């Protein structure tokens, strides 16, 4: 933890004291692991991003998010996590704006939009199972990755049962 600025060390110290049921550890990407009850943050991030990331993952932890069964559900969970993170932020003098939240959720909306588009006829359809979509228009089935998601965005993180 020696690479962290005192202000961040202090922030994490408060979180550890307030949430002794969770572990907070430095790692290479932000993550919440329901399995080990660990919130991972990345010390390489700038101060603001690090704080946002930790609060967001902590929100997943407090909301007991474990897995999702559809892309739409993931979007809902992400929205809940961001809104709780903003609420938690008030206690720690970290201001997460609604604008920032909507920007983050937009990356999920774009992702969902791309995944739900039929590669054959182009219509947008509802997900069929956690890893498949089925087109009501032309009948095509296609698979999508489920366990892993990555976004081309600096707030990128993942969470799941794996770690
Ligand atoms: Zn999240
Ligand atoms: Zn189609």
Image (cartoon, rainbow, N blue to C red):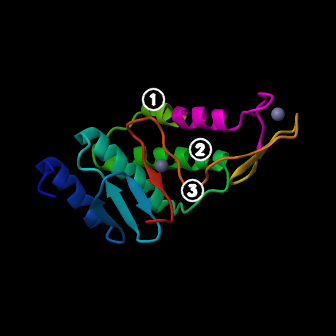
Residue underneath mark 1: 99
> What residue is rendered at 42% in x and 43% in y?
156
The mark found on residue 75 in the picture is 2
Circle 1 Cα neighbour tier, 10 Å, few/some/many (<14 / 14–19 / ≥20): few
Q: Earlier in the sequence, mark 1 or mark 2?
A: 2
Circle 2 — which element? helix
Circle 2 Cα neighbour tier, 10 Å, few/some/many (<14 / 14–19 / ≥20): some
> What residue is rendered at 11% in x and 56% in y?
2
Magenta residues?
A: 106-127
> What residue is rendered at 44% in x and 54% in y?
59
Q: Position of 114 compared to 134: left or right?
A: left
- The mark tally for this picture is 3
Q: CA distance from mark 1 to mark 3?
A: 28 Å
Q: Quadrant of residue 50?
A: top left
Question: Depth check: 7 or 67 in front?
Answer: 67
Mark whose residue sits in front, 1 or 2: 2
Would the CB of label 2 be found within 8 Å of ligand 1?
Answer: no
Q: Earlier in the sequence, mark 3 or mark 2?
A: 2
Magenta-span inclusion, residue 109? yes
Circle 1 — which element? helix
Residue 30 in the image: above or below residue 20: above
Circle 3 Cα neighbour tier, 10 Å, few/some/many (<14 / 14–19 / ≥20): some
Q: Quadrant of residue 15?
A: bottom left
Question: Depth check: 19 or 60 in front?
Answer: 60
Q: Earlier in the sequence, mark 1 or mark 3?
A: 1
Residue 155 in the image: above or below residue 145: above
Split into 4 quadrants, where in the image is the C terminus?
Answer: bottom left
Q: Position of residue 103 (x, y in %)?
A: 48, 31
Split into 4 quadrants, where in the image is the N terminus?
Answer: bottom left
Residue underneath mark 3: 147
């Amino acid at each position: 933890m020696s690479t962290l600025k005192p202000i961040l060390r202090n922030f994490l110290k408060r979180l550890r004291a307030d949430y002794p049921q969770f572990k907070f550890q430095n790692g290479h990407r932000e993550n919440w692991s329901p399995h080990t009850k660990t919130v991972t943050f990345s010390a390489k991030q700038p101060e603001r991003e690090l704080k946002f990331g930790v609060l967001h993952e902590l929100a997943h932890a407090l909301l007991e998010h474990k897995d999702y069964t559809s892309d739409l559900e993931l979007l809902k969970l992400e929205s809940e996590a961001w809104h709780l993170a903003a609420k938690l932020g008030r206690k720690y003098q970290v201001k997460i704006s609604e604008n920032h939240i909507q920007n983050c959720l937009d990356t999920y909306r774009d992702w969902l939009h791309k995944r739900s588009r039929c590669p054959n006829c182009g219509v947008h359809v509802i997900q069929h199972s956690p890893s498949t979509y089925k087109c009501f228009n032309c009948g095509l089935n296609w698979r999508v990755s489920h366990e892993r998601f990555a976004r081309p965005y600096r707030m990128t993180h993942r969470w799941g049962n794996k770690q």
